[in-house]
Amino acid sequence: MTFISYLINGISLGSVYAIIALGYTMVYGIAKMLNFAHGDIIMVGGFAVFLSVNSLGLPPLVGVLIAVIVCTALGVTIERVAYRSLRGASPLAVLITAIGVSYLLQNLALLLFGANTKSFSSVVTVPAIKLAEGQLTISGETIVTILSCVVIMIGLTTFIRKTKAGQAMLAVSEDRGAATLMGINVNGTIALTFAIGSALAAVAGVLLCSAYPSLTPYTGAMPGIKAFVAAVFGGIGSIPGAMIGGILLGIIENLSKAYISSQMADAIVFGVLIIVLLVRPTGILGKKIHEKV
Amino acid sequence: MALLEVRDLEVFYGVIRAIKGISFDVNEGEIIALIGANGAGKTTILHTVTGLIPSKSGKIFYNGTEITKMQGHKLVPMGIAHVPEGRRVFSQLSVIQNLRMGAYTRSDKKEIEDTLKMVYERFPRLEERKHQLAGTLSGGEQQMLAMGRALMSHPKLILLDEPSMGLSPIFVKEIFDIIEKISSDGTTVLLVEQNAKKALSISNRAYVLETGNIALSGDAKELMNNDSVKKAYLSE
């Protein structure tokens, strides 16, 4: 029974990674860049909820909504100011800029909110459920996290399949020039991708802080990197890949903590990534790169 | 007034002056050929017209409106379609998804279906393969798909960049027959080709490009009999 409990917690943590990884993978797939500031958007989302719920006393759902709005606006602004002018620049320049934006966000948060750990009170009001005559308890946070992940996955897949904007994303991810010739606004499509990715990061921030209730300016850094690993693990650029990668990563991390060593858990997670990449360099669901002349 | 007017167009790649102040007209209903050797600037001109590369100076008018600085994606709803060199179909999408992408700027579902029917009539092979991934088509089929995709926007003016490149002689003939049909349906055609003989045989007028300048221009039939054209481009 404890194994099942660890497994469920792993899926829950993995769901958070998956939601973050979706942002990484969408931005990579469509804008062809690694947005290393993505993890710090999570932290901004956390602070937005913390300030609106704990300091201003607003209802939790309003707090979540504010976090989503703040993060979406932030993501679109970062894209407009920092990344758009670098379109067509070398990938290295873009990568360094993204790392710069990440440090900027962390240090701005440090300046505004200080380095003290804020204790975040969970915004989840769903009660825990007890199964197997009370031997297995699943917390409300776990339920909400896993459900959110499923809803986001279905929503995103439907959005890309069924809407014009989703089709535009597919076109831009494959060939920007050809997409322009179809009448697709490439800059607008990339901005929309950042908006969606950042909104998801806000949701991830809320879920993460509800499950692990401490908030600092560096809260987003480690989950951000893990989610990046998850995205690569699943096959960067692939939406189902991000999902599978995230959940597997959460399970591996939690089971390692439970049965091997909690200090070694991160090392094991990254070790598994290395092995996967040695065997399948494009990740679990990554496409092989075909070159057709 | 011509449908497309290009005036004193200059385009630079870095410090290299690729297009050296050229002017030309495309009148409604015409097939105009731009011919010339590799590197003469034919593709650059098309890319500049559809806003994929910025121009340094000069003006471009379409239907009387200046479009020189307009963003590329805004030209599609105005009626300009561009079939780029190398087809550039969306290889991970199916044939039908590619065609629907061509109608991206249109919203009337009924009209889109009518255009789709027309495209399938023009290219029966695309209907046979509509669920196949575009990347798995042969070169000639991809060319047909790229042209069909462009027609899905219901253009007034279609720019074709090297449609015969890399195709077998049978496909080349088929593609040129289709270009004539597109023209007789009322779409104006600006055709860039290295296959000068074929291009001149279906065009009304032509411009001969040499390293960023227009060296010669005039009636296509007359150019076909011009000695210097014969010598340089028709390999006779």
Image (cartoon, coloured by chain):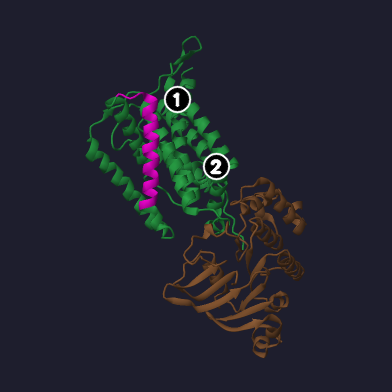
Residue at x 68%, y 65% (from the top left corner): B187
Percent position of residue A231, x then y = 47, 42
Residue at x 67%, y 58% (from the top left corner): B151
Percent position of residue A145, x then y = 45, 27
Percent position of residue B24, x then y = 57, 77
- The colour one sees for chain B in the rendered image is brown
Residue B39 appears in view: no
The residue where tag 2 is placed is A284
The answer to if A76 sits in the magenta stretch is yes
Label 2: few (<14), some (14–19) or many (≥20) C-alpha neighbours in 10 Å: many
Q: CA distance from mark 2 to mark 1?
A: 23 Å
Look at the numbered disc 2 and give the secondary structure of its residue: loop
Instruction: From the viewer's side, name the closer residue of A204 and B189.
Output: B189
Region in magenta: A57-81
Instruction: From the viewer's side, name the closer residue of A214 and A27.
Output: A27
Residue A9 appears in view: yes
Q: Is residue A130 above or below residue A75?
A: above
Label 1: few (<14), some (14–19) or many (≥20) C-alpha neighbours in 10 Å: many
Residue B10 in the figure: left or right of residue B197 = left
Q: Which chain is green?
A: A
> Label 1 marks which chain's residue?
A
Q: Is residue B189 above or below residue A202?
A: below
Label the magenta part by its dominant secondary structure.
helix
> Label 2 marks which chain's residue?
A
The residue where tag 1 is placed is A9
Look at the numbered disc 1 and give the secondary structure of its residue: helix
Earlier along the polypeptide chain: callout 2 or callout 1?
1
Residue B108 in the figure: left or right of residue B19 = right
Q: Amino acid at mark 1?
A: Asn
Residue at x 64%, y 60% (from the top left corner): B155
Residue at x 42%, y 49% (from the top left corner): A34
